[in-house]
Amino acid sequence: MDRQIIAKRIRAIRREMTKKRISCLILTKPANVTYATGFFGDDSWAAIAKARTYLLTDSRYTEQARKECPQCPIVERTGSMADAVAKLAAKLKSVRTITVEKSVSLADFEALKKHVKTRLRSAADIIEKTRSLKHPAEVAAIKASASIAAKALRQTLGHIKPGMTEIELAGMLDFQIRKSAAANSFDTIVAFGPNASRPHHQPGRKKLKQKDTVLIDFGAKYKGYCSDITRCFVLGPMTALYRKVFDVVERAQAAAIKAISPGVKLTQVDAAAREVIRSSGLPVYGHGTGHGLGLEIHELPFLKADGKGKLKAGQVITIEPGIYIPGKLGVRIEDDVLVTETGSRILTRRCPHSPFLANSSR
Amino acid sequence: MDRQIIAKRIRAIRREMTKKRISCLILTKPANVTYATGFFGDDSWAAIAKARTYLLTDSRYTEQARKECPQCPIVERTGSMADAVAKLAAKLKSVRTITVEKSVSLADFEALKKHVKTRLRSAADIIEKTRSLKHPAEVAAIKASASIAAKALRQTLGHIKPGMTEIELAGMLDFQIRKSAAANSFDTIVAFGPNASRPHHQPGRKKLKQKDTVLIDFGAKYKGYCSDITRCFVLGPMTALYRKVFDVVERAQAAAIKAISPGVKLTQVDAAAREVIRSSGLPVYGHGTGHGLGLEIHELPFLKADGKGKLKAGQVITIEPGIYIPGKLGVRIEDDVLVTETGSRILTRRCPHSPFLANSSR
């Protein structure tokens, strides 16, 4: 991300900080550190103070940090992170209270309490709230990531054949993603037949059979931004049950997407999908209907039955209802959707939709 | 892992708990949950009480949990994790204090304080200490993971040629790992030429040139267990500087491995490697000399200049000194080593060692 975008983010974060009377905020979550500094390394924290944003890292990352966040003074620590924060706090004389992200571990927070002389507080979701509203450059990055994922799936579908294992299929898809200079946004899920009834199935050595079904839940991470897509396929003709389930999930997803608009309650979108499934008499899924995505694969907002808040223009969310019948089947369909000023725009349109492999592989 | 191994682990953990007067321990770190229950899913906690170990999960994982940890009563939560712990705590009437792992986030700990009526405490490293001593079955799993990584590297080396990008090379290696039904233990690092001076370089679109050098830091994860290996290669003949650096790093690593024995201070092993580099006049690395590995890629013990404690038989650690000259080169050599009763055993012997590609690819 370029310097101007980072500067804009910092201004938005500072406005949130001012509202909450926070003068210095310590970021400990990697995605938040990346968001506020542009730094993509690990094991590093950031401190947003009045005038500047500091990056606290160690010698493994100093060279990368200088390159990725030239605007940040870099604090190269040799001791513990708590010690580095204490030293920085001692320098920032006008800061009377230091606020730490609540996502910090209890161990780290206790170490900070021990080392830092300045008063400590904690706060949740300051950066996460700012991050949930995407800049057009971020939407473009998510879309690019979705296009890479779609291309990888298209290239993989033609190679699906009986005898291959879930792991092989996942590996093939991941390799296609890598060829586009992207990474996986999470461990690819490939589930054959009844394995798909476990929403978070881990690919195994199960071999694909004639007439089997395939669920693929995957995503690319490109320039830091994630996509997240689920598709279901049949090798042979569909059974009557699978056809019914697939149709109901498709309609549930369409109903939820139709419900998306700025100002709409998160629970309303969630309920729109569930209602279609409930009225069909099929079992309603136990997971959420969707989640925000961006630098993290799961971020604000979360669309759940007990979710709080409303959709805002600029958010990017997944919509992923499913139906699971243990021992028999699982179907989930998932797309990534931008909340626009007037409704929504699907960012994953390019990804094959048809469950019939012969048609969908081209 | 089979039931008897899990039962043995629980007995070892309970001994630690008794020493620390802990009657009920809440595990929140995924690797610790896996260790104590056998469950490999995400978003789940465990509670080790007097008689039983409970798994707290949600409907996405119930089916998997029943299969992977038949010995655990499963608490299927529909609300928050804090709420699930509160309900369980209310049932466990003899428990007067609940202890939570310090790796819990501050947000989760505060939610627990709000919901749970029982008194709360926190403790660090109870499971981590137990985990650092590996059962022979765990050593075998790490060795199997190392063999998969070695095989993947051998299969990849023959394909290294000028014009390919760091990302492509990483993708090729990852695909080979996948073909062995394993996953990556972390994101593969491939660094060409001077990029290797950044110890945690992220593979990019840089193309390999004639006479270039290649650093590869990677590992497999097989049946939950990690391996971690770094190798360096040259495409053409070695420059005099690279030869000197490579030789010093090799000697530094050998010195550290030679120092390994039960009862030896962690700092002694660390110092053994650093001393070889220091006396050569080359720059001493800023990272640690090694770390434990197992269910996590980085776990106890940590071999650093300021590390505390001594090596114990049954620990598996990496030894990975390096020399980094920004703008010029980076060399790191890393192997996985078991601390035995009498000294050490290298688990990554099968992985190609020679820096010359023509020789090392077979």
Image (cartoon, coloured by chain):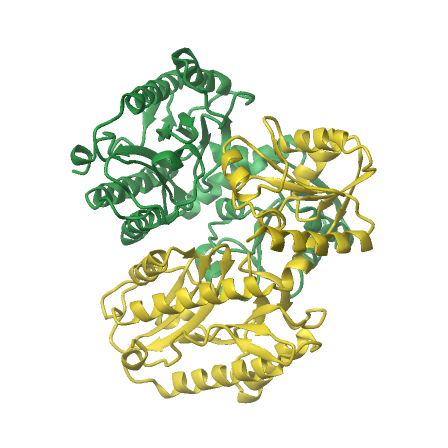
Chain colours: A yellow, B green
Which residue does the image show at 56% across and 86% down from the upper left?
A276
Q: For residue A273, say whether it is visible.
A: no
Q: Is residue B178 above or below residue A306?
A: above
Please state which of residues A91 and B317 is positioned toward the viewer in this rendering.
A91
Please state which of residues A60 and A233 is positioned toward the viewer in this rendering.
A60
Q: Is residue A351 above or below residue B64?
A: below
Q: Residue furthest top?
A: B279
Please state which of residues A3 and A284 is positioned toward the viewer in this rendering.
A3
Which residue does the image show at 49% across and 53% down from the upper left?
B71
Q: The C terminus of chain B is located in which quarter? A: top left
Task: Describe residue A152's horizontal placement relative to residue A201 as left or right.
Answer: left
Q: For residue A250, say whether it is visible.
A: yes
Q: Is residue B144 above or below residue A206?
A: above
Q: Residue B1: horizontal and vertical position, in percent?
A: 40, 47
Q: Residue A249: horizontal and vertical position, in percent?
A: 49, 81
Task: Describe residue A15's horizontal placement relative to residue B267 as left or right.
Answer: right
Please state which of residues B202 and A269 is positioned toward the viewer in this rendering.
B202
Q: Quadrant of residue A130?
A: bottom right
Q: Residue A8: horizontal and vertical position, in percent?
A: 67, 55
**Numbered disc total:** 0
Which residue does the image show at 68% across and 71% down from the upper left?
A312
Q: Quadrant of residue B325?
A: top left
Q: Residue B324: horizontal and vertical position, in percent?
A: 42, 27
Task: Describe residue B189's horizontal placement relative to residue B213 as left or right.
Answer: right
Q: Residue furthest front?
A: A4
Which residue does the image show at 42% across and 57% down from the upper left?
A184
